[in-house]
Image: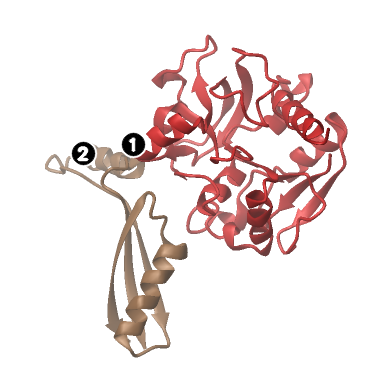
Amino acid sequence: MLKAQIKVLLKQSVLDPQGQAVEKALGSLGYNNVEHVRVGKYLEVTLAENNREAAHKQVEEMCERLLTNTVIEDYTFTLVEV
Amino acid sequence: MKFGVVVFPGSNCDLDAYHLVKDVIKQPVDYVWHQEESVTGYDCIILPGGFSYGDYLRCGAIARFSPVMKAVKEFALRGGLVIGICNGFQVLVEAGLLPGALYRNTVLQFRCQFTHLKVENYETPFTETIERGRLLKIPIAHGEGNYYVDNETLRQLESNGQIIFRYATEQGEVSDTANPNGSVYNIAGVCNANKNVLGMMPHPERAGEAILGSEDGLMIFDSILKHWEGSRL
Protein backbone atom coordinates (compact mmCIF):
# COMPACT_ATOMS: atom_id res chain seq x y z
CA MET A 1 0.00 0.00 0.00
CA LEU A 2 0.99 3.59 -0.50
CA LYS A 3 0.20 6.53 1.71
CA ALA A 4 0.02 10.05 0.32
CA GLN A 5 1.14 12.73 2.75
CA ILE A 6 -0.50 15.85 1.43
CA LYS A 7 0.29 19.39 2.53
CA VAL A 8 -2.08 22.20 1.64
CA LEU A 9 -1.23 25.87 2.07
CA LEU A 10 -2.89 29.08 0.98
CA LYS A 11 -1.16 30.53 -2.07
CA GLN A 12 1.50 33.13 -1.30
CA SER A 13 -0.69 35.77 -2.97
CA VAL A 14 -3.61 35.00 -0.63
CA LEU A 15 -3.68 36.66 2.78
CA ASP A 16 -3.59 34.10 5.61
CA PRO A 17 -5.58 35.47 8.58
CA GLN A 18 -4.89 32.40 10.74
CA GLY A 19 -1.17 32.57 10.04
CA GLN A 20 -1.15 36.24 11.01
CA ALA A 21 -2.94 35.53 14.28
CA VAL A 22 -0.51 32.73 15.16
CA GLU A 23 2.40 34.98 14.22
CA LYS A 24 1.16 37.64 16.64
CA ALA A 25 0.60 35.05 19.37
CA LEU A 26 4.15 33.73 19.01
CA GLY A 27 5.42 37.29 19.18
CA SER A 28 3.48 37.90 22.38
CA LEU A 29 5.07 34.76 23.86
CA GLY A 30 8.42 36.42 23.36
CA TYR A 31 9.56 34.69 20.17
CA ASN A 32 10.81 37.89 18.65
CA ASN A 33 12.66 36.23 15.78
CA VAL A 34 9.47 34.85 14.16
CA GLU A 35 9.41 36.33 10.68
CA HIS A 36 6.37 34.73 9.17
CA VAL A 37 3.75 32.04 9.88
CA ARG A 38 1.36 30.36 7.51
CA VAL A 39 -1.27 27.85 8.60
CA GLY A 40 -2.27 25.00 6.33
CA LYS A 41 -3.66 21.50 6.33
CA TYR A 42 -2.10 18.08 6.36
CA LEU A 43 -3.95 15.07 4.97
CA GLU A 44 -3.02 11.41 4.77
CA VAL A 45 -4.67 9.24 2.14
CA THR A 46 -3.82 5.55 2.16
CA LEU A 47 -4.39 3.71 -1.10
CA ALA A 48 -4.69 0.02 -1.86
CA GLU A 49 -2.20 0.58 -4.63
CA ASN A 50 1.46 -0.35 -5.07
CA ASN A 51 2.14 1.32 -8.39
CA ARG A 52 3.68 4.68 -7.55
CA GLU A 53 2.92 6.22 -10.90
CA ALA A 54 -0.76 5.27 -10.74
CA ALA A 55 -0.99 6.45 -7.13
CA HIS A 56 0.67 9.76 -7.99
CA LYS A 57 -1.76 10.38 -10.80
CA GLN A 58 -4.74 9.50 -8.62
CA VAL A 59 -3.70 11.68 -5.67
CA GLU A 60 -3.11 14.59 -8.00
CA GLU A 61 -6.62 14.17 -9.38
CA MET A 62 -8.06 13.97 -5.84
CA CYS A 63 -6.26 17.18 -4.91
CA GLU A 64 -7.57 18.99 -7.96
CA ARG A 65 -11.14 17.75 -7.65
CA LEU A 66 -11.83 17.79 -3.92
CA LEU A 67 -8.97 17.99 -1.45
CA THR A 68 -7.86 21.50 -2.35
CA ASN A 69 -9.36 24.61 -3.87
CA THR A 70 -6.78 25.61 -6.43
CA VAL A 71 -8.17 29.15 -6.61
CA ILE A 72 -6.65 29.88 -3.21
CA GLU A 73 -4.55 26.86 -2.24
CA ASP A 74 -1.32 25.13 -3.33
CA TYR A 75 -0.53 21.54 -2.49
CA THR A 76 2.43 19.19 -2.41
CA PHE A 77 2.52 15.52 -1.53
CA THR A 78 4.87 12.62 -1.09
CA LEU A 79 4.07 8.92 -1.36
CA VAL A 80 5.43 6.55 1.27
CA GLU A 81 5.20 2.75 1.56
CA VAL A 82 3.03 1.48 4.39
CA MET B 1 -43.30 31.09 -10.02
CA LYS B 2 -42.13 27.92 -8.37
CA PHE B 3 -39.13 27.94 -6.04
CA GLY B 4 -37.04 25.02 -4.81
CA VAL B 5 -35.00 25.33 -1.62
CA VAL B 6 -32.19 22.78 -1.60
CA VAL B 7 -31.58 21.06 1.73
CA PHE B 8 -28.13 19.64 2.43
CA PRO B 9 -27.30 17.87 5.67
CA GLY B 10 -26.28 20.85 7.79
CA SER B 11 -28.30 23.52 5.97
CA ASN B 12 -29.95 25.78 8.53
CA CYS B 13 -31.35 28.73 6.61
CA ASP B 14 -33.55 26.48 4.48
CA LEU B 15 -36.50 27.24 6.77
CA ASP B 16 -35.94 31.00 6.52
CA ALA B 17 -35.82 30.85 2.73
CA TYR B 18 -38.89 28.60 2.57
CA HIS B 19 -40.80 30.92 4.92
CA LEU B 20 -39.93 34.01 2.90
CA VAL B 21 -41.08 32.47 -0.37
CA LYS B 22 -44.23 30.85 1.03
CA ASP B 23 -45.44 33.43 3.55
CA VAL B 24 -43.95 36.74 2.45
CA ILE B 25 -43.77 36.74 -1.35
CA LYS B 26 -46.48 34.05 -1.43
CA GLN B 27 -45.19 31.78 -4.17
CA PRO B 28 -45.22 28.00 -4.36
CA VAL B 29 -42.11 26.43 -2.86
CA ASP B 30 -40.73 22.96 -2.07
CA TYR B 31 -37.77 21.69 -0.15
CA VAL B 32 -35.45 19.77 -2.47
CA TRP B 33 -33.41 17.10 -0.67
CA HIS B 34 -29.75 16.89 -1.65
CA GLN B 35 -30.20 13.33 -2.94
CA GLU B 36 -32.68 14.47 -5.60
CA GLU B 37 -31.37 14.02 -9.10
CA SER B 38 -33.70 16.46 -10.79
CA VAL B 39 -34.90 20.03 -10.32
CA THR B 40 -37.34 19.92 -13.21
CA GLY B 41 -40.46 22.00 -12.65
CA TYR B 42 -38.77 24.78 -10.69
CA ASP B 43 -38.28 28.32 -11.93
CA CYS B 44 -35.75 29.35 -9.31
CA ILE B 45 -33.46 27.31 -7.10
CA ILE B 46 -32.28 28.66 -3.76
CA LEU B 47 -29.14 27.22 -2.15
CA PRO B 48 -29.57 28.29 1.45
CA GLY B 49 -27.13 29.14 4.22
CA GLY B 50 -25.84 26.82 6.89
CA PHE B 51 -23.00 24.40 7.34
CA SER B 52 -23.49 21.77 4.66
CA TYR B 53 -21.62 18.58 5.52
CA GLY B 54 -20.35 20.30 8.65
CA ASP B 55 -18.17 22.62 6.52
CA TYR B 56 -15.68 19.73 6.59
CA LEU B 57 -12.58 20.16 4.44
CA ARG B 58 -13.76 23.54 3.14
CA CYS B 59 -17.17 25.26 3.17
CA GLY B 60 -19.22 23.86 0.30
CA ALA B 61 -16.48 21.49 -0.87
CA ILE B 62 -18.42 18.31 -0.22
CA ALA B 63 -21.93 19.63 -0.91
CA ARG B 64 -20.96 20.40 -4.50
CA PHE B 65 -20.78 16.66 -5.18
CA SER B 66 -24.35 16.01 -3.99
CA PRO B 67 -26.60 14.46 -6.63
CA VAL B 68 -28.79 17.58 -6.59
CA MET B 69 -25.85 19.79 -7.54
CA LYS B 70 -25.44 17.98 -10.85
CA ALA B 71 -29.08 18.83 -11.58
CA VAL B 72 -28.62 22.43 -10.37
CA LYS B 73 -25.60 22.79 -12.63
CA GLU B 74 -27.57 21.60 -15.66
CA PHE B 75 -30.48 23.86 -14.66
CA ALA B 76 -28.08 26.83 -14.44
CA LEU B 77 -26.46 26.05 -17.78
CA ARG B 78 -29.93 26.02 -19.37
CA GLY B 79 -30.47 29.54 -17.99
CA GLY B 80 -32.46 28.68 -14.85
CA LEU B 81 -32.32 31.21 -12.01
CA VAL B 82 -30.14 30.12 -9.09
CA ILE B 83 -29.43 32.12 -5.96
CA GLY B 84 -26.86 30.89 -3.44
CA ILE B 85 -26.94 32.62 -0.07
CA CYS B 86 -24.03 32.41 2.38
CA ASN B 87 -23.16 28.68 2.46
CA GLY B 88 -25.08 28.44 -0.83
CA PHE B 89 -22.63 30.98 -2.30
CA GLN B 90 -19.74 28.86 -0.99
CA VAL B 91 -21.25 25.80 -2.69
CA LEU B 92 -21.58 27.70 -5.99
CA VAL B 93 -17.92 28.79 -6.03
CA GLU B 94 -16.74 25.31 -5.09
CA ALA B 95 -18.93 23.90 -7.87
CA GLY B 96 -17.33 26.27 -10.34
CA LEU B 97 -20.67 27.91 -11.18
CA LEU B 98 -19.27 31.20 -9.92
CA PRO B 99 -15.69 32.47 -10.03
CA GLY B 100 -13.45 32.99 -7.00
CA ALA B 101 -13.28 31.41 -3.58
CA LEU B 102 -14.55 32.16 -0.07
CA TYR B 103 -12.37 31.63 2.97
CA ARG B 104 -11.70 32.74 6.55
CA ASN B 105 -12.67 36.31 7.45
CA THR B 106 -9.58 38.44 7.93
CA VAL B 107 -10.96 39.52 11.31
CA LEU B 108 -11.03 35.86 12.45
CA GLN B 109 -14.46 36.44 13.95
CA PHE B 110 -17.83 35.10 13.00
CA ARG B 111 -19.55 38.29 11.84
CA CYS B 112 -23.25 38.58 12.57
CA GLN B 113 -24.46 42.10 11.77
CA PHE B 114 -26.36 44.28 9.33
CA THR B 115 -24.45 45.38 6.25
CA HIS B 116 -25.27 47.97 3.63
CA LEU B 117 -24.95 46.84 0.06
CA LYS B 118 -24.27 49.01 -2.93
CA VAL B 119 -25.78 47.58 -6.10
CA GLU B 120 -23.17 47.55 -8.85
CA ASN B 121 -25.22 46.18 -11.73
CA TYR B 122 -28.95 46.68 -12.23
CA GLU B 123 -29.11 44.70 -15.43
CA THR B 124 -29.60 41.29 -13.85
CA PRO B 125 -32.72 39.29 -12.98
CA PHE B 126 -31.86 39.80 -9.31
CA THR B 127 -31.51 43.58 -9.34
CA GLU B 128 -33.36 45.01 -12.33
CA THR B 129 -36.29 46.48 -10.40
CA ILE B 130 -34.28 47.83 -7.48
CA GLU B 131 -34.50 51.59 -7.14
CA ARG B 132 -31.32 53.14 -8.57
CA GLY B 133 -28.85 54.27 -5.94
CA ARG B 134 -30.76 52.60 -3.14
CA LEU B 135 -28.56 50.85 -0.54
CA LEU B 136 -29.80 47.49 0.67
CA LYS B 137 -29.67 46.85 4.42
CA ILE B 138 -29.20 43.09 4.70
CA PRO B 139 -27.57 41.05 7.48
CA ILE B 140 -24.56 38.77 7.25
CA ALA B 141 -23.73 35.83 9.53
CA HIS B 142 -20.54 34.03 8.59
CA GLY B 143 -16.98 33.17 9.55
CA GLU B 144 -15.79 32.38 6.05
CA GLY B 145 -17.14 35.03 3.75
CA ASN B 146 -13.87 36.53 2.63
CA TYR B 147 -14.22 36.60 -1.15
CA TYR B 148 -11.04 36.11 -3.11
CA VAL B 149 -10.28 36.44 -6.81
CA ASP B 150 -6.95 37.23 -8.42
CA ASN B 151 -6.47 40.64 -10.03
CA GLU B 152 -7.00 39.43 -13.55
CA THR B 153 -10.30 37.73 -12.70
CA LEU B 154 -11.38 40.82 -10.77
CA ARG B 155 -10.86 42.94 -13.88
CA GLN B 156 -12.86 40.46 -15.93
CA LEU B 157 -15.69 40.46 -13.39
CA GLU B 158 -15.73 44.22 -13.43
CA SER B 159 -15.78 44.56 -17.20
CA ASN B 160 -18.49 41.86 -17.52
CA GLY B 161 -20.66 43.50 -14.86
CA GLN B 162 -20.53 40.36 -12.71
CA ILE B 163 -19.93 42.20 -9.45
CA ILE B 164 -23.45 42.69 -8.10
CA PHE B 165 -23.14 43.83 -4.48
CA ARG B 166 -20.37 45.57 -2.54
CA TYR B 167 -20.20 46.31 1.17
CA ALA B 168 -20.64 50.02 1.87
CA THR B 169 -21.14 52.25 4.89
CA GLU B 170 -24.63 53.39 5.82
CA GLN B 171 -23.86 56.52 3.80
CA GLY B 172 -23.04 54.45 0.74
CA GLU B 173 -19.29 54.74 0.81
CA VAL B 174 -17.43 51.60 -0.26
CA SER B 175 -14.46 51.57 2.12
CA ASP B 176 -12.29 49.33 4.28
CA THR B 177 -14.33 50.23 7.34
CA ALA B 178 -17.45 48.91 5.60
CA ASN B 179 -15.75 45.63 4.72
CA PRO B 180 -16.77 43.05 7.35
CA ASN B 181 -14.64 40.13 6.22
CA GLY B 182 -11.71 41.28 4.09
CA SER B 183 -13.33 40.50 0.73
CA VAL B 184 -11.42 41.68 -2.32
CA TYR B 185 -12.93 44.95 -3.63
CA ASN B 186 -15.58 44.77 -0.84
CA ILE B 187 -17.41 42.15 -2.88
CA ALA B 188 -20.56 40.81 -1.21
CA GLY B 189 -22.16 39.16 -4.23
CA VAL B 190 -21.25 38.11 -7.77
CA CYS B 191 -23.01 36.45 -10.64
CA ASN B 192 -21.95 34.30 -13.58
CA ALA B 193 -21.31 35.70 -17.04
CA ASN B 194 -24.89 34.89 -18.12
CA LYS B 195 -26.32 36.70 -15.05
CA ASN B 196 -28.67 33.85 -14.09
CA VAL B 197 -26.64 32.56 -11.14
CA LEU B 198 -26.13 34.85 -8.14
CA GLY B 199 -24.06 34.16 -5.04
CA MET B 200 -24.09 36.48 -2.05
CA MET B 201 -22.89 36.25 1.54
CA PRO B 202 -25.62 38.55 3.02
CA HIS B 203 -28.98 36.95 3.78
CA PRO B 204 -31.85 38.63 1.87
CA GLU B 205 -34.25 35.97 3.21
CA ARG B 206 -33.60 37.34 6.70
CA ALA B 207 -34.51 40.85 5.62
CA GLY B 208 -38.02 40.36 4.30
CA GLU B 209 -40.19 41.62 7.13
CA ALA B 210 -40.16 44.86 9.15
CA ILE B 211 -40.06 42.89 12.41
CA LEU B 212 -36.63 41.60 11.37
CA GLY B 213 -35.22 45.11 11.07
CA SER B 214 -35.25 45.40 7.30
CA GLU B 215 -37.37 44.53 4.30
CA ASP B 216 -34.67 45.31 1.76
CA GLY B 217 -34.07 41.65 0.95
CA LEU B 218 -37.50 41.64 -0.67
CA MET B 219 -36.22 43.89 -3.43
CA ILE B 220 -34.09 41.04 -4.71
CA PHE B 221 -36.98 38.58 -4.64
CA ASP B 222 -39.36 41.13 -6.23
CA SER B 223 -36.85 41.58 -9.00
CA ILE B 224 -36.63 37.81 -9.53
CA LEU B 225 -40.45 37.59 -9.68
CA LYS B 226 -40.85 40.48 -12.11
CA HIS B 227 -38.05 39.15 -14.28
CA TRP B 228 -39.73 35.76 -14.42
CA GLU B 229 -43.14 37.29 -15.18
CA GLY B 230 -41.54 39.40 -17.92
CA SER B 231 -39.83 36.39 -19.43
CA ARG B 232 -43.21 34.67 -19.80
CA LEU B 233 -44.87 37.44 -21.80
Question: What chain letter is assigned to the residue under label 1?
Answer: B
User: Callout 2 environment at 10 Å: few (<14), some (14 to 19), or many (20+)?
Assistant: some
**Image spot of residue B215 (x, y percent):** 73, 21
Instruction: From the viewer's perspective, tell me whether residue B201 is left or right of residue A54.
Output: right
- The kind of secondary structure element at disc 2 is helix
Label 2: which residue? Answer: A27
Rendered residue at 53%/45% (across/down): B98
Q: Is residue A73 above or below residue B104?
A: below
Instruction: Tell me if residue B183 can be seen.
Output: yes
Q: Quadrant of the N terminus of chain B?
A: top right
Farthest residue, direction front: B233
Q: CA distance from mark 1 to mark 2?
A: 32 Å
Rendered residue at 75%/38% (across/down): B16
Label 1: which residue? Answer: B151
Rendered residue at 41%/70% (across/down): A61
**Image spot of residue B205 (x, y percent):** 72, 33
Rendered residue at 73%/64% (across/down): B37
Q: Do dots 1 and 2 share one subunit?
A: no
**Image spot of residue B8 (x, y percent):** 68, 55
Q: Chain A is shown in which shade?
A: brown
Residue type pointed to by label 1: Asn
Of tags 1 and 2, the one toward the viewer is 1
**Image spot of residue A51 (x, y percent):** 33, 89
Which quarter of the figure has residue B222? top right
